Image (tube, helix red, strand yellow):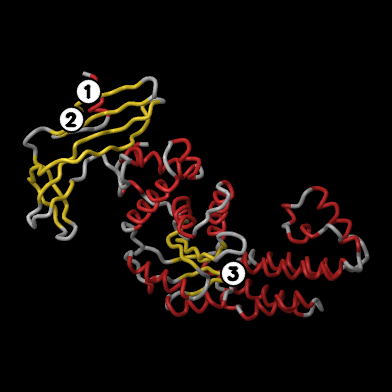
Amino acid sequence: MTKELFQMALNVTEPWFVKDLKFDVESKRLDIYIDFKRGSTFSFFDKQEDKKLVGLKAYDTSNKTWKHLNFFEHECYLHAKVPRVKLPNGKVKRISTPWEGLSNGFTLLFEAFLLQLCQAMPVNKVATITKTSDDKLWSMLEKYIEQTREHEDFKEITSIGLDETSRAKGHEYITLFVDLAKRRTIFITKGKDNTTVQRFAEDFEAHGGKTDSIDNVSCDMSPAFIKGVKEYLPKAQITFDKFHILKIINEAVDKVRKQEVSTNKLLTGTRYIWLKNHNNLTVKQKETLESLTISNMNLKTMRAYNIRQSFQEIYQATTQEEFTTYLSKWYYWATHSRLSPIIKAAKMVKRHWDGIIRWHESKINNGILEGLNSVIQAAKSKARGYKTFKNYKIIAYLLTGKLDFSLVNHRFKEI
């Protein structure tokens, strides 16, 4: 009766059956032994011939062991004599059992459990909790991401965002491509030059997408990205991400402050007042800003700050004509401000005029991508960084790719 109970719990079906159980209380371990009925036939998928062979009898057997989900606090292992079958070409191959996972030595259910854990905590922590090796976990994650991505279908994607991030300070750059509609990462590659877009285009086409169908791209004003989009996504119109534009204007405001602080010590320690939105200021910062506003010092930093605030208000325009008018007035004000960092930032805006105005029609930006990137950075921080690009890419797909692992592991949704 106990064997039958475990057989049902493990979903072991004919010709397989639970032959024996060994429960060691002292070592807190449960070993389950599975066998098959004599005379049974099996199937084997021949990848070379791309067909399933059925009705094959066991040629011989080999002993295999798999780590399974814990039985309460007890480690659990499955053991089986697994048949090898002789193929029509004379080769002898081991069959796949219904319970084995993609990794050597894990069951499907255990792998589904590991996937869920790795999405919630650092990989090295999962390895410690489940008494598995770090390397084996990374290898398993890589297999699941590679095989699940093979099922990806990009034919409905028309709007993407791209942005670069560094794996670690001083290390190589990585470019992420995001499906803006479904808010998920769909491609990750090394570098931040125009060839990153070429590699994306190749991967996009390999997953059923058509580069001609991408009509909107959100990115920063990197010449490399602009060149790559024009070359490899020919029908796409670029919307320059307003967050990156504002970042450049913020840098200009900060340069003005740095120049002025040497002659006006009241600006000491006020850096973040000028870079934050008013709603995000602390009570003390708001009081400081108000006191500087009502003073009669005619601060250059205050003028730069007002120009920055005005730029943000442009995005409240209700029509494209209104948006263009506001931007034109802002450009005139900025270029006549007699503040060289602000003038330089305004001329940058002028060089990318069409892509900035394009926002009012496309309404896309990289805010979604910034959010996904913050998830990755938080995970990296918890794990004290990822030493290799491969592992960084794995964790990025795992946390922000919204991959459906049930496509390669039907037990995934059971956890």
Most foreground residue, 80 or 325: 80
Residue bearing the label numbered 1: 3
Residue 96 horizontal/vertical position (percent): 21, 45
Residue at 10 percent across and 42 percent down: it is 58
Residue 215 horizontal/vertical position (percent): 44, 71
Number of the front mark, 3 or 2: 2
Spatial CA distance of label 1 from label 3 is 72 Å
Q: In the picture shown, does residue 235 fall above or below 17?
A: below
Is disc 2 in contact with disc 1, using a CB cutoff of under 8 Å?
Answer: yes
Q: In the picture shown, does residue 60 fall above or below 396?
A: above
Residue at 72 percent across and 57 percent down: it is 277
The amino acid at mark 2 is Phe
Instruction: Find residue 66 and report its image quarter.
Output: top left
The amino acid at mark 1 is Lys
The numbered disc on residue 319 is 3
Instruction: Find residue 315 and report its image quarter.
Output: bottom right
Number of the front mark, 1 or 3: 1
Dot 2 crowding, Cα within 10 Å, few <14, some 14–19, many 20+: many
The numbered disc on residue 375 is none
**Sooner in the amino-acid sequence: mark 2 or mark 1:** 1
**Disc 2 secondary structure class:** strand
Residue 178 horizontal/vertical position (percent): 47, 61
The numbered disc on residue 17 is 2
Image-based side of 182 in relation to 46, left or right: right
Is disc 3 in contact with disc 2, using a CB cutoff of under 8 Å?
Answer: no
Image-based side of 393 in relation to 205, left or right: right
Q: Is residue 293 visible?
A: no
Q: Is residue 408 visible?
A: yes
**Sooner in the amino-acid sequence: mark 1 or mark 3:** 1
Spatial CA distance of label 3 from label 2 is 70 Å
The amino acid at mark 3 is Thr
